[in-house]
Image: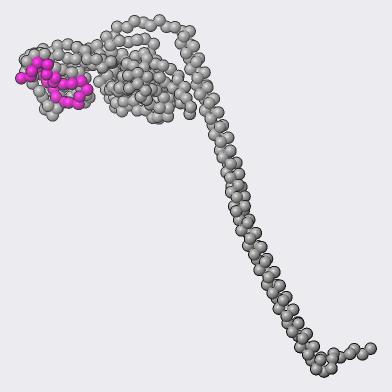
Amino acid sequence: MSQPEEIKIQQGDETFEFYIIARGECECFVKDETRKEKFVNTLKVGKYFGEIALITGNRRTATIQTKNYSTIGMITADHFDELCHLFPEIKKKLHDGMINYKDPYKKWQKIQLQNINYLKEISQVTLEELTYKLGHEFFEEGQVLFKNGDEISKIYILANGTVDTYVSLSDEDLILDKLKIQGTVFGQFTILDKEKITYSARATSETNMLVLDKAHLQKHREDYKDLNEALSRTMDMIKEEGMPMLDYQASRRPPTINALFKEEKFDAIRVFKECVQKLLDLKKFNRKKEFKFSELLKFLRNQEMTEVERKKQQAEELMGSIRPLLQQKIEKLLTDRVDRLLGTVERQDFKISKITDVLNHIYEAKGGPPQNKS
């Protein structure tokens, strides 16, 4: 027995049980793109819920809570798989019911998916399957979604909020677009090729993004021929025409969750001016990149010249510090040599004077020195 307002499953949870209402009623709620919970419908006796997570392997797509005292049967994931194996028609019926199930939020999600160029012409069945693979990511004001040069692995679809696209220089961020229209798509072509994103994106308010992972897209490509053909055509187009300069596409109409649209008057002159301004900004960015590169070369040359001058200065400083020492050494060496020479000369003079004295004594003893005969 379940109490009134008892939550049986919570949107976004990873739980895998199947429920059947035996007595009482349950209410279904779904969070919209602004994360506000909205009532969808009431489930009565005999109705079931929880099959979508079991069939798709995804998180819960809705919140179900009891409306009054209720008796609800539960089947675990293992028993559900066993039941579907024994009775394949049951799984087929549940799958068909899942495909045919309609609610405003699901219809809104399908509309957002069709903003992706190559998903515009795929079948409703394939589109339904991809709808259940959509995830949510929430970004705070100022938070970066991705940066120029990143390898992104998912497509982003703006559900609610505002985003700036920009390119970064060393001293500034050059804003390309301020995007706030639901359905704006980021990275739809980049994820199909091994290319890096060519711009950065940043939330400028609390922002909710629908995201479609590349892995899910590739897996469904193997299962659905129409999706495979659409992706193949797009990749051929990219090979022939090249990757878009900026891989984002702004929606030009304001879709709402209940799929009631008011066509936005198309202002061709305004759009043309925005495109021209964007091209001018990109040209400015590329010019600055070239300027920065030339500045880098100049800096490296200056560094090289500075290095030579620095080594020369170091050599001069070294010689300046060594020169007094060398001079002292040379002076000392010369002084020592002169002193030794003077000492030698003095000793020689002493010896000569001694010899002279001896000779004088001999001469005196013999009667004087001999006389020269002419």
Q: Nearer the viewer, residue 322 or 76?
A: 322
Quarter of the rendering containing residue 341: bottom right
In magenta segment, residue 105: no
Left or right, 86 with reference to 287: left
Quadrant where the image shows the N terminus? top left
Quarter of the rendering containing residue 41: top left
Q: Nearer the viewer, residue 99 or 253?
A: 253
| Residue drawn where x is 42% and y is 6% of the image | 266
Q: Is residue 342 shown above or below 56?
A: below
Q: Nearer the viewer, residue 157 or 53?
A: 157
Residue at the farthest bottom position: 366
Percent x, y for residue 168? 46, 26
| Residue drawn where x is 72% and y is 76% of the image | 346
Percent x, y for residue 219? 29, 27
Quadrant where the image shows the C terminus? bottom right
Looking at the image, can residue 229 be seen? no
Percent x, y for residue 310? 58, 45
| Residue drawn where x is 38% and y is 6% of the image | 264
Give the colour scheme of this rendering. Answer: one colour
| Residue drawn where x is 81% and y is 91% of the image | 364
User: What segment is highlighted magenta in the picture?
Assistant: 1-22
